[in-house]
Image (cartoon, grey):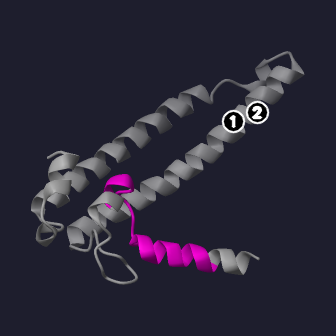
Amino acid sequence: MTEQEILAMPAEDYMNPAQLDFFRDRLLRLRRELSERAGQREGDARVGAEDLPDSTDRATVEEQRFVAQRLAEREASLLGKIDAALRRIEEGRYGYCEKTGQPIGIQRLLARPMAILAVEAKNDDEAREAQYAR
């Protein structure tokens, strides 16, 4: 199925088997891509800063390592969210807001297939976070 076909389905067909298969495939593809990138980054990180004679080059390599480590941490977190979304598909809970139980919506899931909150619930959470951050 394509995104257009998913979007063209009537609301009564929300999270039917075809839609669940579509999102399962999308999540598995995202997972595979993240895993492949992580493997490539491990190879890139093997260049040792101590092997470089110039202190500026060493600092650049260390900075690149730091950025790569932060990216790896974010991707590891994303992998966990993808795995959780795949579990929700298997459990029959995928596509429904964890706070309200209402449909998250196809468009939101297309943009963020591992979403657990509907837009309204997410906005409420962000507004509360911003209020407490002051």
Residue 107 in sight from this viewpoint: yes
Q: Looking at the rendering, in which quadrant would you find the C terminus?
A: bottom right
Given the image, on which type of amino acid does mark 1 rest?
Arg
Where residue 75 appears, as percent x and y from the top left, is 51, 49
Looking at the rendering, the stretch of residues picked out in magenta corresponds to: 109-128
Q: Is residue 131 above or below residue 9?
A: below
Tell me, yes or no, whether the highlighted magenta stretch contains residue 92.
Answer: no
Choose between 11 and 62: the one closer to the eye.
11
Rate crowding at label 1 as few (under 14), some (14 to 19) or many (20 or more) other CA atoms within 10 Å: some
Q: Quadrant of residue 60?
A: top right
Could you tell whether 128 is left or right of 87 in the image? right
Dot 1 corresponds to which residue?
Answer: 65
Secondary structure mostly seen in magenta is helix
Where residue 88 appears, as percent x and y from the top left, is 28, 69
Q: Residue at x 88, y 22 (%)?
A: 55
Question: Dot 1 lies on which element?
Answer: helix
Question: Dot 2 lies on which element?
Answer: helix
Q: Quadrant of residue 126?
A: bottom right
Dot 2 corresponds to which residue?
Answer: 62
Q: Is residue 60 above or below residue 24?
A: above
